[in-house]
């Protein structure tokens, strides 16, 4: 059995962290790594003890939700809170960092930003990374499937199973497909 690469492993961690997000617009996760060891993780969500987007909706000003602390910032703040240095560390993020997070990552000494998805890659952010000597590398998560749309898929498959139930079970192929879907999606 072939093991997954370090990049795939850390990116999978970031996707898992994203599942804790309380933002309804975009779920983002970030994992800070030094010497192949995870030193912090974060996801985008509200300030501790405050209202969450999933409860009251996003608080949008000029097209941006101002209610949330971004995943990268949360991971960096976790390091600051517990006295963990970030100089010469790497970060794995599910989405390309925004301009503000770009500046924070540069200032904190992050040397490489690995990201899975392009997301409004700001031209100035790209320029700042280059000027600071921070590498950016796209890492597609291809070994594992961390599905952030699983609820929607389960709902769709359950709907399809309901429609199949309404059909006659005389068709063996339909009957087989229904049983396979139930094995995968029914609890």
Image (tube, rainbow, N blue to C red):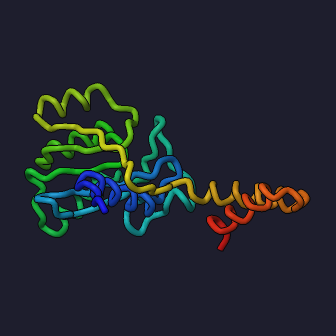
Question: Is 121 drawn above or below residue 34 in the view shown?
Answer: above
Camera-side residue: 105 or 5? 5
Q: Quadrant of residue 132?
A: top left
x, y percentage for residue 158? 73, 61
Tell me the residue at 60%/59% (across/down): 151
Left or right: residue 180 versus residue 169 is left
Question: Is 28 drawn above or below residue 138 in the view shown?
Answer: below
Left or right: residue 140 versus residue 20 is left
Q: Quadrant of residue 144?
A: bottom left
Tell me the residue at 24%/39% (across/down): 137
Which quadrant: the C terminus? bottom right
Tell me the residue at 51%/56% (across/down): 53
Question: Is 55 drawn above or below residue 111 in the view shown?
Answer: below
x, y percentage for residue 66? 42, 47
Tell me the residue at 28%/40% (across/down): 100
Camera-side residue: 19 or 139? 139
x, y percentage for residue 57? 56, 53
Left or right: residue 130 versus residue 47 is left
x, y percentage for residue 55? 56, 62
């Amino acid at each position: 059995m072939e093991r997954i690469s370090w990049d795939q492993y850390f990116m999978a961690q970031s996707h898992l962290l994203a599942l804790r997000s309380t933002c309804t617009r975009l779920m983002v996760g970030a994992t800070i790594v030094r010497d192949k060891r995870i030193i912090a993780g974060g996801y985008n969500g509200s300030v501790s003890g405050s209202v969450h987007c999933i409860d009251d909706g996003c608080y949008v000003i000029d097209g941006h939700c101002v209610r949330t602390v971004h995943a990268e910032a949360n991971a960096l703040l976790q390091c600051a809170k517990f006295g963990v240095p970030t100089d010469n560390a790497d970060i794995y993020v599910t989405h390309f960092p925004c301009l503000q997070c770009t500046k924070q990552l540069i200032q904190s000494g992050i040397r490489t930003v690995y990201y899975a998805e392009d997301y409004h890659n700001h031209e100035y952010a790209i320029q700042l990374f280059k000027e600071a000597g921070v590498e950016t590398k796209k890492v597609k998560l291809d070994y594992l499937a961390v599905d952030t749309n699983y609820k929607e898929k389960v709902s769709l498959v359950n709907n399809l199973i309901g429609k199949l139930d309404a059909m006659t079970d005389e068709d063996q192929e339909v009957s087989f497909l229904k049983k396979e879907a139930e094995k995968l999606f029914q609890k």
